[in-house]
Amino acid sequence: MDHVVYVDAKAKATDMEEIVAGKRTMIIRGATGRKLPYGRVHEDDTLYLIRNNGEGLIRVKCVVTNVVNTDKLTKEASIHLVEENQPKLNLTEKQIKRWAGKRYLVLISIKDVEEVSPFAIDRSEYGNMDDWLPVEDIEKVKNQ
């Protein structure tokens, strides 16, 4: 399964740059309820990374090595889990505030990070502006 994943482009060193440099080997998502990618991403899936700055280009791909979908967490347990994984997540303070404390977390370990020739995707079948799109096969959404 292929996934298009939007990553933060606002931080000083963007999420994408840190992933490419190997400073970030885990991606986090979280919410009050079970929302994407909860339960939908699995080992050996391929993630295609796109910046959330409107440019609309896939620039990096990587492979999922491990996924942790948490059960409902207390605020304290959620904060602890984020702190415990901070060496792999390498989050900014603002990102820690965004994710720590969420009831449900998804921690996704990645490997085989590689930059790809930038390409655009067709989002027309994905009405919501979510930051995670399970596209099944990247070739189906790739703009030719």
Image: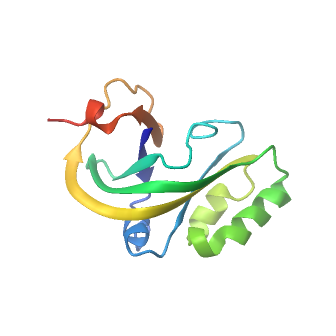
User: Which residue is rendered at x = 26% and y = 35% of the image?
Assistant: 139
Q: Let me know if residue 61 appears in the view.
A: yes
Depth order, front residue of 120/68? 68
- The reply, left or right, for residue 81 in relation to residue 19 is right
Depth order, front residue of 117/103? 117
Above or below 61: residue 23: below
Q: Residue 122 in the image: x percent, y percent?
A: 27, 32
Above or below 140: residue 63: below
Depth order, front residue of 82/3? 3
Q: Residue 114 in the image: x percent, y percent?
A: 32, 63
- The reply, left or right, for residue 29 in relation to residue 138 is right
Q: Residue 106 in the image: x percent, y percent?
A: 64, 50
Asked which quadrant contains residue 98, the reply is bottom right
Image quadrant for the C terminus? top left
Above or below 57: residue 87: below
- Counting labels gives 0
Q: Let me know if residue 51 appears in the view.
A: no
Q: Residue 38 in the image: x percent, y percent?
A: 63, 40
User: Which residue is rendered at x = 35% and y = 34% of the image?
Assistant: 137
- The reply, left or right, for residue 20 in relation to residue 56 is right
User: Which residue is rendered at x = 64% and y = 71% of the image?
Assistant: 86
User: Which residue is rendered at x = 19% and y = 35% of the image?
Assistant: 143
Residue at the outermost left position: 144
Asked which quadrant contains residue 61, the reply is bottom left
Asked which quadrant contains residue 16, the reply is bottom left
The colour mode here is rainbow
Image quadrant for the N terminus? top left
